[in-house]
Image: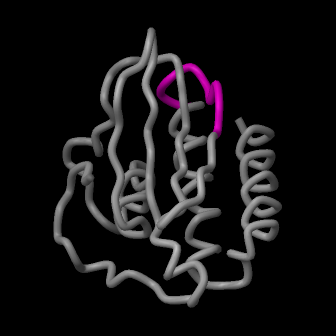
Amino acid sequence: MRGAVGKGRDFTRRTLHDWGWDGSESAEDALLVVSELVSNAALHAGGCHELVLTAGQALRIDVLDGAPSAPRPPAGWRPGVPGGHGLHIVQRLSDRWGSYTHGAGKSVWAEIEGSRLAGGGRRDPRWPPSDGPRG
């Protein structure tokens, strides 16, 4: 798992640099989102089969895995208690996120607005106050 997370972060770091979206706080957020999504795929879905980054109005991060079940934050999750924070981190750092099934697996995706990456801004982590996938 650790190897896949490191490779995903390295790939994302190089790609953000190539696209001119590096050096901002939101670029660091994107690296953390990739880490969480790849880690979740490894821990809960048989591993990350593919990491896809797409640039447009937003950076789109797709992590494809082999488990068709939708991701859900753990029941009884509480801040300050170890474990189970991955999807909450993704929710707080991305502008939108969600999942869709494909074949025998799914893709968990997140988007970060390009204006944040280019301008270095950060989304207000209190808004929207949702606990589920958005998008």
Residue at 34% x, 30% y: name it: 100
Q: Position of residue 80 (x, y in %)?
A: 36, 68
Q: Residue furthest front?
A: 56
Q: Residue furthest top?
A: 104
Q: Quadrant of residue 22?
A: bottom right
Q: Quadrant of residue 126?
A: bottom left
Between 82 and 102, the residue placed more toward the observer is 102
90 displayed left or right of 120:
left
Q: Is residue 50 magenta?
A: yes
Q: Position of residue 43 (x, y in %)?
A: 54, 31
Q: Position of residue 49 (x, y in %)?
A: 64, 25
124 displayed left or right of 17:
left
Vertical order, 34 against 2 (above or below): below
Residue at 77% x, 63% y: name it: 13
Q: Which residues are magenta?
A: 43-51
Q: Position of residue 58 (x, y in %)?
A: 49, 64
Question: Which quadrant would the N terminus be assigned to in this image?
Answer: top right
Vertical order, 118 against 108 (above or below): below
Residue at 17% x, 62% y: name it: 130
Between 43 and 47, the residue placed more toward the observer is 47
